[in-house]
Amino acid sequence: MAIERTLSILKPDATRRNITGKIITCFEDAGLRVVAQRRVHLTPDQAGAFYAVHKERPFYNDLVSFMSSGPVVVQVLEGENAVQKHRDVMGATNPKDATPGTVRALFALSIDENSVHGSDSLENAKNEIAFFFKDTDIVG
Ligand code: ADP
Ligand code: MG
């Protein structure tokens, strides 16, 4: 399997509760490596641009206001099959459906405040990484 990179975001509910380290440990324990990382408080415009793909969805406005409600940690994770592996460790979008032991089963508060974002394909991962990081910010 190929070494990939994926974009991971620890959402405002995670920074608010001071559990970013616990969540990162889940990813590291699965063999993923942090190769770039930054804490940022997104503006509504930045959050809206990042989630533009969901513009027509009924939850878009709530999502944008939540993602700009406090600091987030944006990071690039690297490893074998990183895109799918990260999604597997994250668990289902709705914590009620998330497999026990996954990040969302362990830490998410609700479908809105679900602690983590992860790219859903290699192509989206490339675009989402470029949204936050220059090539020189990534140290593998
Ligand atoms: P994922 O984050 O698992 O890739 P999506 O890309 O479908 O999920 O949705 C992006 C984010 O929008 C979710 O993580 C969640 O915070 C929010 N969201 C998705 N579906 C809903 C919903 N039905 N109600 C409220 N918020 C939602
Ligand atoms: Mg998604």
Image (cartoon, rainbow, N blue to C red):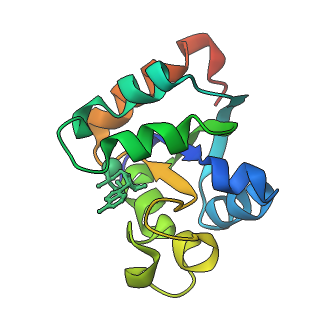
Front residue of this view, candidates 73 and 129:
73
Q: In this view, does 1 lie above or below 9?
A: below
Q: Judge from the rendering whether residue 48 lies leftward or rightward of residue 75; answer left or right.
A: left
> How many numbered circles does the render carry?
0
- Relative image position of residue 39 (x, y in whole percent): 72, 31
- Relative image position of residue 21 (x, y in whole percent): 79, 57
Q: Is residue 37 above or below residue 94?
A: above
Is there any visible trace of residue 80 in the rendered image? no
- Relative image position of residue 62 (x, y in whole percent): 41, 46
Q: Judge from the rendering whether residue 4 lies leftward or rightward of residue 27; answer left or right.
A: left
Which residue is located at x 68 percent, y 39 percent? 70
Which residue is located at x 53 percent, y 45 percent? 66
Front residue of this view, candidates 79 and 41:
41
Front residue of this view, candidates 58 and 12:
58
Which residue is located at x 78 percent, y 60 percent? 19
Instruction: Locate residue 48: give its quadrant.
Output: top left
Instruction: Locate residue 63: give its quadrant.
Output: top left
Q: In which quarter of the image is the C terminus?
A: top right
- Relative image position of residue 29 (x, y in whole percent): 67, 67
Is there any visible trace of residue 56 in the rendered image? yes
Q: Which residue lies furthest to the left in this view?
A: 56
Q: Judge from the rendering whether residue 19 lies leftward or rightward of residue 86; answer left or right.
A: right
Which residue is located at x 62 percent, y 39 percent? 69
Q: Quadrant of the N terminus?
A: bottom left
Quarter for ligand 1?
bottom left
Front residue of this view, candidates 40 and 33:
40
Q: Judge from the rendering whether residue 123 lies leftward or rightward of residue 103; answer left or right.
A: left
Q: Which residue lies furthest to the bottom in this view?
A: 100
